[in-house]
Amino acid sequence: MTIQPDPPEPPRRTGQQRLGGRSERVVREVIRATLAELGRVGYAALRIDDVAAQAQVNKTTIYRRWPTKAELVTTTLLAMSSSDEDPPDTGSVREDMLALIRRSITRISTCEGEAVYRMIGLEMDHPEVASITRELRGEMHAPWYVTIKRAIERGELPRGTDARLIVEMISATVYSKKLKLREPVDDDYLAAVVNLILRGAVNGGAIRAAAP
């Protein structure tokens, strides 16, 4: 059996900008307005004119910083999903994963977060939405890869553990319950999901044979 390589290195964070003064205020207002419009009309129907009106800026101000709608939306979603917090490092992969999934639930539990994630689910056939989602997923998964790599180095998880498989199993299960089924996701549920997936991973369940 061929084992998978170690978890990928986290991608460079792209959703954060070092700004100050008026520039910072403009970016904050444009991102807020873009989130509101995405939740209201979705990606395909989003118009820069409407974002500019909500943000109370000239649309040329938006175009100077974000030449395309896709760039504006990518920056907006990365800003919504990014965290200034470092990946947790408690010394326990279980506790680190619980901290990460709690952070994720907090971010998507806002009205804007729920609306945007439903929009993504409805418009995944749009090629620009699919591309934005891939970049967003990389940003959101980055701290998980750091956590799993540390766990492998500590001997909590076996070499060859497929980090992406673990992250996708946890996030898909929790997000589906929260956003698609619209059922409550409490801490007991999160702990049960993490426990179930980790027990399999500890015993090699996340080591996959290479594709032929």
Image (tube, helix red, strand yellow):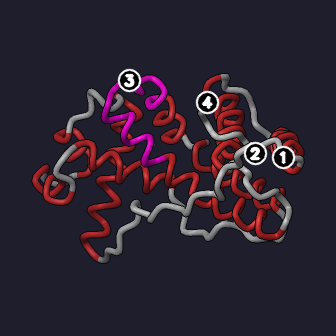
Residue extent of the magenta highlight: 119-136
Pointers 2 and 4 in contact (C-beta within 8 Å): no
Q: Is residue 176 visible?
A: yes
Badge 3 or badge 2: first in the primary sequence: 3
The residue indicated by pointer 2 is 207
Above-or-below relation of 106 to 21: above
**Residue 76 at x, y = what percent?**
37, 51
Q: Residues within 10 Å of mark 1 (few under 14, many from 20)?
A: some
Q: Secondary structure at mark 1?
A: loop
Q: Which residue is mark 4?
A: 179
Q: Residue furthest left?
A: 60
Q: CA distance from mark 3 to mark 2?
A: 31 Å
- Which one is in front in this view, the residue at disc 3 or the one at disc 2? 2
Type of residue at label 3?
Asp
Secondary structure mostly taken by the magenta-highlighted segment of the chain: helix
Residue type at mark 4 is: Leu
Which residue in the protein does label 3 denote?
Answer: 125
